[in-house]
Every structure is written in C-alpha cells, then in structure tokens.
Amino acid sequence: MNRVLIVEDEDHLAAGLKLNLEAEGYAADVEDTGEAALERLVDGGGFDVVLLDVMLPGLDGFEVVRRLREARQFVPVMLLTARSHTDDVLRGFEAGADDYLPKPFDLSILLARIRGLLRRRRWLRGNEAGQPAEADECSFAGRHVDFRNQVLRRDRAEQPLTLMEATLLRYLVQHAGETVSRRTLLEQVWGVRQDTDTRTVDNFVARLRRYIEAEPAQPRHLLTVRGVGYRFVVEPED
C-alpha cells in the first residue's frame, strides 16, 4: 500500500484529501505545519508521495521542499498551490519539487497526478512493464548515472537526483542523438498539457548541466537545439 503525507493547514481540505485517498486504497497521514512535516520526512518517514501546500504557517512549502532536498531526502513532492503564476511554479521546481497542482483542483486530476509520480518512480526502478533493463544505468565521460537509485556519480562524488531530474535525464539518454522538443518533454516526462510554460524544461536542463557538464555554460552532452528543444550526446565530436 502506498503511503501519502498530506501537509495542509486547512483542516477541512486535509480531512477531505485523507478521506478520498484512503477510499482509493492509499494510506494517508496529515501534518498541518512545515516544521512537523520536515521532522517526519527528514528521518525517512516511509512515504511514497508528499502533497505539500505552499501557503503554510511558519515554513512555507517552498522552504520545506528545499530543506528536504538539502537533507538528501528525495521522496516525490507535489506542491498544492493557489499561486499558479509561472514564477511561483518555477520557484517550486527550483526548490526541488517534482510536480504542482493549482488550487482548486478536481479530485480525479489529483489522483491521476499521484499515479503519474508513482509510475515514474517504478519506471526509474525498472518495475514498469515494457521498460528496457539496460536503461537502468548509463555511463559517459567519467559520469555514471544509476537511475534506479537516483544518483549521479562523478569525480568520486555522488549527486542525488530528484525524481523528475532522473526521469528527464533517463528520457534524454534513451533518445540519445535525437532532437526532443520541449513540448514532447513536458508531455512525456511531466505528463502535463501543452500550454504549460516551457521554461519548466529549461530550468531542469540547467540543473542537469551543472551535474554532468565540465563547463555548464558550454555544454557538450546536453545540447540546445535553438527554437526546438534539446539533444543528448554521449560522445561529443571534438
């Protein structure tokens, strides 16, 4: 049974989410402050997904997810926010969130997005039907990516990856040499509709470049195809 932590200070909304998630077969717990959520999550917690309200008393959702990632905890986090402005969404992704859902939202959409996060995690771990086992790991230019455990190793150091960072990199690796549009990445990696701002993709690519490129400002592996999208190259031409 998948466990979901709901971090929401509006009692009626938290109770409704818990009731509906349990009716769908999830085990759901509730915390009403960011501090309490961090205390449970930093120690592991055993949760499979976190539903995190942005507008919390004390530590807001952005700060919670930022501190969670700093503590090297990479449970999938979905932000629930009435602040759906593009800059707020990008701020959430920059902090380390994996997905977001604007309030008010339809329950069926929330459930679909939770299933999507769980499916991506199974895909990374090689438990999703139809995914090739050889894509569980990738090595290039002294870098080694373990998608199953969401870790990139480089120069004897380890860089943990969030669920969406690992999913995006795996998708690009599986399509190495191909130009992949931003719209395709949004649909195939994030599972979001086409009118979502494509800066989401650019933001994640910039982060991946910091992990895998010797000179992120002059990338040799994760290339920009101007006006279209990106192309991953395993062995760049000199």
Image: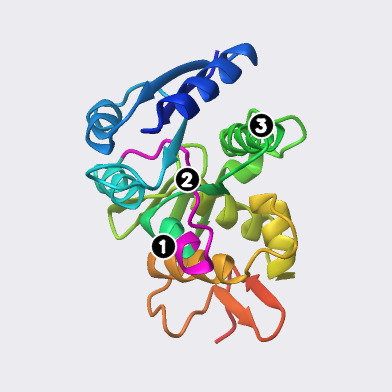
For disc 3, the marked residue is 107
Q: Whole-Å distance between the Cαs marked 1 and 3?
A: 24 Å
Question: Going from the N terminus, do you reach mark 1 or mark 3 first?
Answer: 1
Residue at the image point whose x is 38% and y is 75% from the top: 214
Q: Nearest the camera: 236 or 96?
A: 96
What is the tally of numbered marks visible in this picture? 3
Q: Nearest the camera: 200 or 131?
A: 200
- Describe the element under mark 2 as helix, strand or loop: strand
For disc 1, the marked residue is 91
Per the rendering, the mark at residue 79 is 2
Q: Is residue 9 found left or right of 228 in the rendered image?
A: left
- Describe the element under mark 3 as helix, strand or loop: helix
Q: Which circle, 1 or 3, is nearer the viewer? A: 3
| Mark 2 surroundings within 10 Å by alpha-carbon count, few (fewer than 14), some (14 through 19), many (20 or more) | many
> Can see residue 48?
no
Residue at the image point whose x is 67% and y is 59% from the top: 186
Magenta stretch encompasses residue 49: no
Q: Are marks 1 and 2 in contact (CB under 8 Å)?
A: no
Q: Nearest the camera: 34 or 184?
A: 34
Residues in magenta, as a range: 73-89
Question: Going from the N terminus, do you reach mark 1 or mark 2 first?
Answer: 2
The C terminus sits in image quarter: bottom right
Residue 78 appears at what percent x and percent y? Answer: 50, 42
